[in-house]
Image: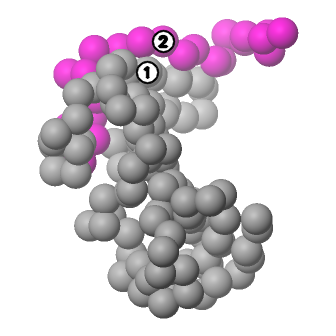
């Protein structure tokens, strides 16, 4: 059963060209070989968020200004260029066979999901704070 919608919650499909320029530049730089399947705008009274789904299943979420919040490359690896160096070093050292399939950045932490489902949480200083399998 779907949650009831309110006047302040509006999610709708939009044209790719309606994404903020910053989001379009991010996609062009890091996902230039992928086709965009669809683009959504979630607009409520407090904030806007954009979601882009690529033809290979990758989902990218952006804030209202077009800065990325989450990259979920379900079937591939997150582009290395967007992974902070200290997180990449930790994963390479401790999980050399694993690939980063999801990267989420929040105000005070980073969440990383590896192949096999292991989840790592780092604080703003890139210190490991949690491991969840």
Circle 1: element type: strand
Coordinates of residue 43 in the picture (x, y in percent):
52, 23
- Left or right of 97 in this view: 65: left
**Which residue occupies 65% across, 17% down?**
8
Q: Which of the pair 122/131 is nearer the observer? A: 131
Q: Is residue 15 magenta?
A: yes
As drawn, which residue projects farthest toward the front?
A: 97
Task: Say if 89 sits above or below 25 in the image.
Answer: below
Which image quadrant is residue 18 in?
Answer: top left
CB atoms of marks 2 and 1 within 8 Å: yes
| Alpha carbon distance from label 2 to label 1 | 6 Å
Residue 97 visible in rendering: yes
Coordinates of residue 114 in the picture (x, y in percent):
56, 63
Q: Which residue is mark 2?
A: 12
Q: Which residue is mark 1?
A: 40
**Which residue occupies 48% across, 12% down?**
12
**Which residue occupies 71% across, 81% down?**
129
- Left or right of 32 in this view: 48: right
Q: Which of the pair 120/109 is nearer the observer? A: 120
* Mark 2 residue crowding within 10 angstroms, few (<14) / some (14–19) / many (20+): few
């Amino acid at each position: 059963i779907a949650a009831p919608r309110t006047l302040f919650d509006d999610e709708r499909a939009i044209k790719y060209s309606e994404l903020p320029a910053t989001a379009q530049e991010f996609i062009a730089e890091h996902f230039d070989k992928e086709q965009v399947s669809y683009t959504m705008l979630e607009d409520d009274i407090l904030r806007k968020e954009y979601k882009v789904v690529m033809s290979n299943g990758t989902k990218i979420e952006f804030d209202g200004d077009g800065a990325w919040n989450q990259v979920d490359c379900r079937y591939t690896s997150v582009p290395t260029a967007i992974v902070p160096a200290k997180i990449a070093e930790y994963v390479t050292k401790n999980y050399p066979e694993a690939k980063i399939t999801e990267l989420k950045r929040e105000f005070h932490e980073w969440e990383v999901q590896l192949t096999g489902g292991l989840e790592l949480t780092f604080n703003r200083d890139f210190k490991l704070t949690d491991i969840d399998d």
